[in-house]
Image: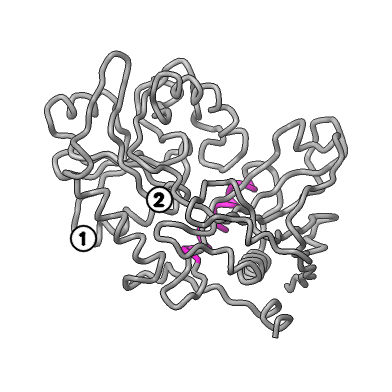
Amino acid sequence: MKFPIHIERTEVSHLHEVDFNQLQFGKWYSDHMFVAEWRHGRWVDCHIIPFGNLPFSPASSALHYGQIIFEGMKAFRGPDGTPLLFRPEMNRLRFNLSAERMGMPTVPEALWHDALNELIWLDRRWIPQQEGASLYVRPFMFATDRFIGIRPTEFFKFIIITSPAGLYYSRPVKVLTMEHYVRAFPGGVGYAKAAGNYGATMLPLREALQQGYDQVLWLDGIERRYVQEIGTMNVFFVIDETVLTPELDGTILEGVTRDSLITLLKDKGIRVEERKIDINELIQAGREGRLQDAFGTGTAASVVAISEIRHRQNTVQLPPVEERSWWKQLKAELDGIKYGTRPDPYGWRVPVQSKLVAAVLN
């Protein structure tokens, strides 16, 4: 099925307003955005329009019941200037998994592909050239029914916006556990990128920041014992040369970066265990000097070292980051694939290609 996309180019670009040497994550937005409507069981009215505010009813069901999902992706500038995406199909599959869990329509491959490629190609000048920077890509969907009542929703908007971004974390992060708050539990929506998952973490995050920490290291919702993920990242630990990460049990996000690192590690012959990780096991390993490394992973954060873990009255200080090779080597290898400076034996790197925009501009 084809999805015709109408393009309305902005009359005035705001590119000149951005200081690309001082990029902050989520501050600037590119000139255009993609918008499509779900009505009467199909996707219609696909447009690329100038970035701007959206008109919608205050009775829209998304505002009242949180029927909102999103994805996080990045576009990179290759050595020859070609815009590059990293595993966009995995993002589409995860977006649709979130959509199904939240009772929303899925996005067909053709629509996802064309919307991403045409939008990014049109705003390709917004992809930063600076080292470590990228164009953050945010697809999202929300319900637009004008009905205050609980019922299956019939109308939705699918939108993609982009934003030139620098590093999400500019230094190693400190994390602490919180046993009186719960992020996710079996049968819930922890594995989905639903907006409510993140809204519920704002108060705990504020408390963590007030205590001098950067994020919450979430524990399971039943025993408050097993590690799930960090607020914005999946998490990895290295104990006795073995890499540990929480198993996908329906309570944590199936991260694209997480999956990529597991593949890289296994191809190097390094032992990786996806399993339940007891917080007390980590504390004990830290006390005994066997916790060699710990790092978070995510699209926005890439790979970032963890410097400190606190659980109750126990604090584990990780070795200095300059003495740890695990996270640093993995980040360098993954970034090399993303930016096109290293071979990509997995086919993860996908060049952005345009048919419609390129034809219009030519």
Examine the rendered structure and indicate whether residue 285 appears above or below residue 40.
above
2 or 1: tag closer to the N-terminus:
1
Q: Tell me which corner region of the image, top left, top right, bottom left or bottom right, holds residue 226.
A: top left
State yes or no: discs 2 and 1 in contact (Cβ < 8 Å): no
Q: Tell me which corner region of the image, top left, top right, bottom left or bottom right, holds residue 119.
A: bottom right
Examine the rendered structure and indicate whether residue 254 appears above or below residue 80.
above
SS of the residue under disc 1: loop
Q: Quick check: 57 left or right of 46?
A: right
Where does the magenta region start and end?
A: 85-100
| Residue receiving disc 1 | 268
- Residue at position x 34%, y 60% from top? 334
Examine the rendered structure and indicate whether residue 258 appears above or below residue 314.
below
Amino acid beneath label 2: Ser
- On the image, the x and y values in percent for residue 272 come to 25, 48
Residue 86 lies in magenta, yes or no?
A: yes
Question: What is the magenta segment's predominant secondary structure?
Answer: helix
Q: Quick check: 248 left or right of 295?
A: right
Q: Quick check: 110 left or right of 61?
A: left
Pick the front one: 199 or 90: 199
Circle 2 packing at 10 Å, graded few (<14), some (14-19), many (20+), is some
- Residue at position x 50%, y 30% from top? 184
Q: Quick check: 153 left or right of 328?
A: right
Circle 1 packing at 10 Å, graded few (<14), some (14-19), many (20+), is few
Amino acid beneath label 1: Lys
> As drawn, which residue projects farthest toward the bottom?
362
- On the image, the x and y values in percent for residue 31 come to 69, 60
SS of the residue under disc 2: strand
| Residue receiving disc 2 | 302
Pick the front one: 9 or 111: 9
